[in-house]
Image (cartoon, grey):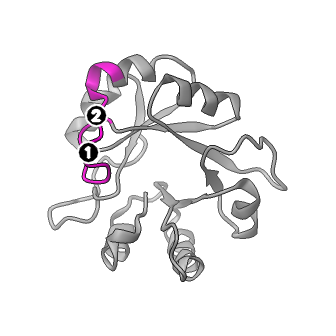
């Protein structure tokens, strides 16, 4: 998950992602969003990373993304796209499945700087939600490799993060599909 507050650390984080990992490009509201996206897209293609654009399926096709991330109810696009959606509870998770999402980012699994003060799901509620559908669930929010190992046993198909690959001690280990 990219975030405008990452600044120049974004480029280091992209270099730490393992081949086959995915990027959900957000960077909302920036005047140079498209230029940043194009730079990320070049890196993603060169490194074998999947690139999903936070936006409508129409925008994802126009920007040559591999997929679209969001709550769009539009099930079809001009070409096949990976469809991802955010969910914070059972209602949003069910809506994602109804709207044709291929996977859902369930958050916040744990306390996170991205959403200060937000109530974390914790392992028990995360596990209850992850087991509801056949839709693959990606854990998001306060994630790292040890926490993912805990949630994998509860139904997490993988994990994601905004800060997971930005710190000096991050190794990019385990932050892809498990």
Q: x, y (%) of residue 137?
A: 47, 32
The alpha-carbon separation of the residues under discs 2 and 1 comes to 9 Å
Q: Residues within 10 Å of mark 2 (few under 14, many from 20)?
A: some
Pointer 2 and pointer 1: residues touching (CB < 8 Å)? yes
Is 5 on the left or on the right of 80, as rendered? left
**Dot 2 corresponds to which residue?**
120
Nearer to us of marks 2 and 1 is 2
Quarter of the picture containing the C terminus is top left
Q: Residue at x 69, y 28 (%)?
A: 98
The quarter of the displayed image where residue 134 is located: top right
Q: Which quadrant would the N terminus be assigned to in this image?
A: bottom left
The stretch of residues the image draws in magenta is 109-125
Q: Is residue 120 magenta?
A: yes
Q: Is residue 9 magenta?
A: no
Kindly indicate the quadrant of the structure image that contains residue 83.
Answer: top right
Q: Where does label 1 land, which residue?
A: 142
In primary-sequence order, the first of circles 2 and 1 is 2
Overall secondary structure of the magenta stretch?
Answer: loop
């Amino acid at each position: 998950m990219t975030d405008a507050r990452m600044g120049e650390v974004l480029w280091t984080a992209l270099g730490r992602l393992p081949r086959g990992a995915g990027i959900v490009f957000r960077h909302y509201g920036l005047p140079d969003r498209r230029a940043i996206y194009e730079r990320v897209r070049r890196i993603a293609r060169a490194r074998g990373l999947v690139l999903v654009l936070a936006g409508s399926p129409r925008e994802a096709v126009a920007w040559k993304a591999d997929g679209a991330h969001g709550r769009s109810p539009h099930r079809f696009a001009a070409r096949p796209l990976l469809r991802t959606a955010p969910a914070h509870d059972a209602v949003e998770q069910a809506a994602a499945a109804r709207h044709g999402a291929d996977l859902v980012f369930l958050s916040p699994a744990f306390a996170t700087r991205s959403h200060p003060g937000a109530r974390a799901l914790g392992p028990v509620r995360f596990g209850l939600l992850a087991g509801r559908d056949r839709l693959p669930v990606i854990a998001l929010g306060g994630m790292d490799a040890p926490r993912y190992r805990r949630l994998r046993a509860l139904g997490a198909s993988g994990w994601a993060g905004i800060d997971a690959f930005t710190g000096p001690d991050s190794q990019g280990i385990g932050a892809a599909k498990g």
